Amino acid sequence: MNRKLINWLGLTGIAAFLSYTLAVVISPSAFPGYKWMEQAVSDLSAESAPSRVLWNQIAALYGVCSVVCATCVSIYVSENKVSSRLFRIGMHLFTVMNWISNVGYAMFPLSDSGKEIASFQEIMHMAVTAAVVLLSIVSLVCLIVAGFKKDGIRGIGVWAAAALLMMMIGAIGQGAVPPQYFGIVERFSVFAAVGFNAVNGIYLFRGFARKAGSINGNLFPQRS
């Protein structure tokens, strides 16, 4: 395949995933007393968190690369009329979600890790979270439905279903499991969108398998 610049930019989705994963794994080392099984990931980047500086350093690529990847995917599927209109709408909504997440959390970080939500900034942080969750669910549902329709990209439909399942596990689990296990189920939700963005980036890198007969192909097809 003769890849263009926009296809190569799909690799930013992988960079975002690796950056975020490393930040989640390494940042607790700078936060004495942090309990990953109990506390949310966002506690690591709270304004008063001792791990905030380290988090910002390790996750520097995450925010920028997530937006770049999602935006490039959205542009590519739009310009090349990939799959159906519903599919493209799903991708556009997923891109909007990434922009709101990147800008919203930067504007309204938690002011104090583990603290009860009370201030305007903390309320806005939760409002951003609500918008991110809603857009994530709607976009994934659109992609699931579009993926399993005629001429749909079934592989993305499957990945979208997996991401939505992870979000549901996180959302339901946070109210179902004991407080000391909140952090475990919460990570299902946060990694769902980051992981799905990386998957989209790989599809973009491959040009969404636009050759005849390959539109429903695997993410990593076997070479003949």
Image (tube, helix red, strand yellow):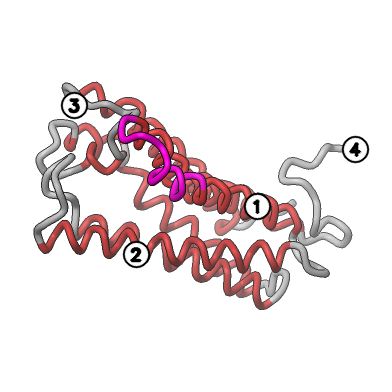
Residue 84 position, x and y percent, is: 71, 74
| Cα distance in 3D space between marks 3 and 1 | 37 Å
Q: Residue at x 58, y 49 (%)?
A: 165
Depth check, mark 1 against mark 4: the one in front is 1
Quarter holding the C terminus? top right
SS state under label 3? loop
Q: Is residue 207 visible?
A: no
Q: Residues within 10 Å of mark 4 (few under 14, many from 20)?
A: few
Residue annotated with mark 4: 224
| Marks 2 and 3, the one that precedes in the sequence | 3
Q: Of label 1 and label 4, which has the lower sequence position?
A: 1
Q: Is residue 96 above or below residue 199?
A: below
Residue that numbered label 1 is attached to? 203
Dominant SS in magenta: helix
Where disc 2 sits, the SS reads helix
Q: Which of the two discs, 2 and 1, sits closer to the camera?
A: 2
Q: Which residue is mark 2?
A: 100
Q: Position of residue 29 (x, y in %)?
A: 24, 21
Q: Is there CB contact under 8 Å for labels 2 and 3? A: no
Q: Which mark is residue 92?
A: none
Pick out the residue farthest to the bottom. Answer: 85
Mark 1 to mark 4 CA distance (whole Å) = 19 Å
Q: Which residues are the magenta region?
A: 169-180
The amino acid type found where label 1 is placed reads: Tyr
Q: Secondary structure at mark 4?
A: loop
| Number of numbered callouts drawn | 4
The residue that mark 3 highlights is: 31
